[in-house]
Image (cartoon, rainbow, N blue to C red):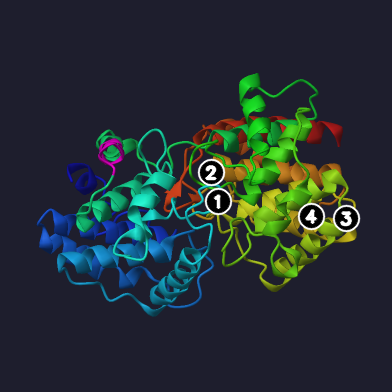
Amino acid sequence: MDWLLAHATTAHTWGASAHRCWFDAYLSTYAAAVALRNAEMPQPADRAAASLPGMVPAGPSSTPETLTFGGLVDALDRISTAQGWPLPAHPAPVRAIMDRERTKWERMRLWPDFYNPSLSIAGYCAERVYGDPAVDAARFLESFQVPNGSIANSPGASAVFLLECERRGQQFDAARLAQLRQYLHSRVPANIGYLDQVPHFVTAWTVMFHHELGIPKPPPLPPRALDELSRDLFHPSGLLCTVGVGATIPGDTDSTACAAIAAAIVGRPAPKAAGLDMMIGSGGAYRTFLFEHDPSLTTNIHMAALLDLEGDHERLLPVLHWLHHQTTQHPDQVCKWHLSPTYTLGEMARVMSKINHPLARSLCANASERLSRTQNSDGGWGSDGSTAEEAGYAAIGLAAAASHGLTGGDWNRTLRRAHSFLSTHEPQLTPLWLGKTLYCVQPLVDVLHTVAIRRIEETCAQK
């Protein structure tokens, strides 16, 4: 509680500022209000709950929905109800998301693979088990606990699931519950992320971005990391999990595509993209996870890169058409996994520059034009102030587009201004990725910073 009170965003709110990401602000503040009530501090809890409606935009919001926002708000409601505490008056947009997530959870519960950690995301979403008698909690614990004692490597899922076990008062495996408690009691507030580790994510992206430099030597990674990446690509589910084998979180399409591309770059074996056909939804777009409401832009950008690499035009063309439709109908749409539109635009420009198809060239040119137009006065990128991560995505994407003649305007000046920003600013570890809350993949920021500077120098020298 001392840590929580010391790290409020304002006197009555927690998490990101509402204008930056209202989902994060809403969820973090509601969680803090529940904790305050539990600590018998009703007045600050009331003030936190009263601030929630003001966080929700009056009109349509371009901020992407986090993966489990509606389910987590619903779980906090059930905890409050069980304790006899008043519930906040959730605004209509929040209730709509909660209803949508509730329907998805009910569909998942009826699914034969609900307790299968290789395919089911239920462990990662274990907060939803609270107050749900239809879930076999003992079986759930056995299915989704990992060797470190947690549920799916998620502190939040672990904490709320333990509350449910205690609420039920039934007999559970004593050793498993002791492991779960030990895991939670060993967490340090300042270091708690929504996941404990994402090693494969960092490995794959380091290889992909280092490859943009065109250097034949291996990327700066230990061979063991590359061996494990390739090994885990052959998981029986066909999906690679960024946390590694045994995490009880299913793999996802985006991570699998990026890892397969990285494996090809470094000459490691990888399965064919056709093994991901189960993830294809309506319109030929790929879902990131099973039961996902809406496909992700960047998941399909990276799948396009993998399909092009394999020469699989039968599966590639529907993805290109879907991306073109999405960006034409919703030009300001951002990726659901990342707060910044620069991430989507940078990856669109970088990947589509290499695909020899009119739709891909059009997507690259449009992304490049928007990147040039949205550069900040200091030479960086970022809707809430320039960051090294956003500037890195933008610069690498623009340089790739320029190398293929797909940029307009004075791209050389744009890249030189980006070089000036990156060279004079130390990398900031800004939380931009969206999971249950905002987080930063810290090793990736340094990779982007270094590669972007060198990529700009190479491109400007060649032109």
Image coords of residue 252 (percent x, y): 60, 49
Q: Name the amino acid, label 2.
A: Thr
- Asked if 134 appears above or below 175 in the picture, the reply is below
In the image, the segment drawn in magenta is 173-179
How far separated are the C-alphas under marks 1 and 3? 35 Å
Name the residue beneath numbered marker 3: 313
Q: Earlier in the sequence, mark 2 or mark 1?
A: 1
Asked if 228 appears above or below 387 in the picture, the reply is above
Residue that numbered label 1 is attached to? 382
N-term mark: 3 or 2? 3
Q: Secondary structure at mark 2?
A: loop
Residue farthest to the left?
Answer: 40
Q: CA–CA distance between discs 2 and 1?
A: 6 Å
Mark 2 sits on what residue?
387
The Cα–Cα distance between marks 3 and 2, rounded to whole angstroms, is: 36 Å
Q: Indicate yes or no whether the magenta region holds residue 176.
A: yes
Q: Amino acid at mark 1?
A: Gly
Q: Secondary structure at mark 3?
A: helix
